[in-house]
Image (cartoon, grey):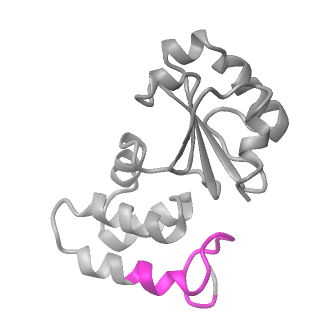
């Protein structure tokens, strides 16, 4: 615990705790409000570390198992840190046939990150997705909100390096 009685966590600074406390306070007596509380707290911190989940549970008077259950059930929530940029590589049939596997390998090797994880410097999070709805551009990669088509293992690093 820090001097204000909040759990210590390197990703939650002293400016965030008053916001988190206000969210909990404003939802404390509302039935079914845990999803809203988790979403708003994740918006502040960027993800939901274990210490924050425990703190939310205590503040909402909910059992730890219920808070963890909700946070782990919904894809909206992340209990691991996210990178400044999210790289999504389409693993659908058209992209697979046109070489997305080699693109994925290049990204994994270059940035030392596995699918579903974040680089140590928190620059990138890497996700494999089933379809990005752009089969005509296969193989397709989306970085943040930018769609890149006809991505090859030769071009992928050059594209990604534009994102600092």
**Residue drawn 68% across and 49% down?**
124
**Residue drawn 40% across and 42% down?**
75
Most common secondary structure along the magenta stretch: loop
**Who is closer to the viewer here, 15 or 97?**
97
**Residue drawn 19% across and 59% down?**
32
Above or below, 113 relative to 14: above
Above or below, 84 relative to 98: below
Residue furthest to the bottom: 3
* Quadrant for the N terminus in the image: bottom right
Residue 108 horizontal/vertical position (percent): 76, 32
* Quadrant for the C terminus in the image: bottom right
Residue 70 horizontal/vertical position (percent): 34, 48
**Who is closer to the viewer here, 57 or 112?**
112
First to last magenta residue range: 3-21
Above or below, 155 relative to 5: above
**Residue drawn 46% across and 21% down?**
135
Residue 152 horizontal/vertical position (percent): 71, 25
Q: Is residue 6 magenta?
A: yes
Task: Determine whether, in the image, residue 19 is placed left or right of residue 47.
Answer: left
Q: Is residue 75 magenta?
A: no
Residue furthest to the top: 97
**Who is closer to the viewer here, 120 or 59?**
120
Task: Determine whether, in the image, residue 27 is placed left or right of residue 111.
Answer: left
């Amino acid at each position: 615990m820090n001097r204000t009685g909040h759990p210590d966590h390197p990703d939650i600074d002293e400016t965030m705790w008053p916001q988190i406390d206000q969210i909990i306070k404003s939802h404390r007596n509302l039935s079914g409000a845990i999803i809203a509380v988790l979403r708003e707290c994740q918006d502040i911190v960027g993800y939901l570390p274990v210490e924050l989940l425990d703190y939310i549970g205590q503040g909402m008077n909910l059992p730890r198992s219920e808070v963890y259950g909700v946070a782990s059930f919904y894809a909206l929530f992340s209990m691991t840190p996210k990178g400044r940029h999210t790289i999504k590589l389409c693993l659908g049939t058209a992209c697979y046939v046109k070489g997305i596997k080699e693109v994925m390998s290049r990204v994994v090797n270059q940035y030392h990150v596995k699918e579903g994880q974040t680089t140590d410097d928190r620059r990138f999070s890497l996700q494999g997705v089933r379809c990005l709805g752009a089969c005509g551009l296969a193989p397709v990669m989306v970085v943040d909100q930018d769609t890149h088509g006809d991505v090859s293992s030769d071009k992928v690093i050059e594209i990604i390096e534009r994102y600092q």
